[in-house]
Amino acid sequence: MQKPEIINLPKFEDPRGNLSFIEEFKHIPFKIERVYWIYDVPGGQVRGGHAFKKQQEFIVALSGSFDVVVDDGTIKQTFSLNRSYYGLYIPAGYWRQMQNFSTNSVAIVLSSTEFDENDYIRDYLDFLKSKKNV
Ligand code: TYD
């Protein structure tokens, strides 16, 4: 089973401003079917708090910073994202939540699937059952 991991992206440093990019299958291990972003998050708010059955994703802090807590049903890991030249790859089957958003932070999420509410596991007990931990 694949694991969540930080993936460094190409970075072209330039006195005019830096540039980074992502190509599907090259920098991330899936085809990009959807892109969404989370912004204007009021202080103290938490986003996510669910798992996906099939969806893989790659999250980049395009601006500001936030933490992503990733949980396999046994172990929780916290990844701090605060640069736009790397991101967090999350395979399917992990509970994840996003928190500690700084003012004006922007999270961009590249997803391997179109939006499908049926792909969500929104109940933590159901998630643990899917992992056979309860
Ligand atoms: P959701 O993924 O539940 O966000 P969070 O877990 O942070 O609360 O998305 C919130 C709502 O936005 C969801 O009810 C449906 C809608 N939505 C779409 O219609 N398309 C999308 O691609 C996403 C990510 C969400």
Image (cartoon, grey):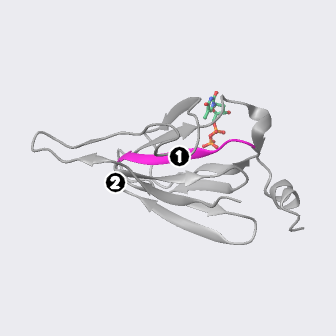
Q: Residue at x 59, y 59 (%)?
A: 4
| Image position, residue 54 (x, y; %) | 74, 42
Q: Residue at x 44, y 53 (%)?
A: 101
* Side of 33 relative to 50 (left or right): left
CA distance for labels 1 and 2 = 14 Å
Q: Is label 2's Cβ within 8 Å of ligand 1?
A: no
Tell me which image quadrant ligand 1 sits in. Answer: top right
The tag earlier along the polypeptide, 1 or 2, is 1
* Side of 102 relative to 5 (left or right): left
| Image position, residue 23 (x, y; %) | 44, 37
Tell me which amino acid carries mark 2: Arg
Q: SS of the residue at dot 2?
A: loop
Report crowding for label 1: few under 14, some 14 to 19, many 20 or more residues within 10 A (C-alpha): many
Residue corresponding to mark 1: 58
For residue 42: magenta? Answer: no
Residue corresponding to mark 2: 83
Magenta stretch: give its range. 54-64
Q: Main secondary structure of the magenta part?
A: strand
In the rendered image of this protein, does residue 107 appear above or below residue 69? above
Tell me which amino acid carries mark 1: Phe
| Image position, residue 1 (x, y; %) | 71, 60
The label nearer to you, 1 versus 2, is 1
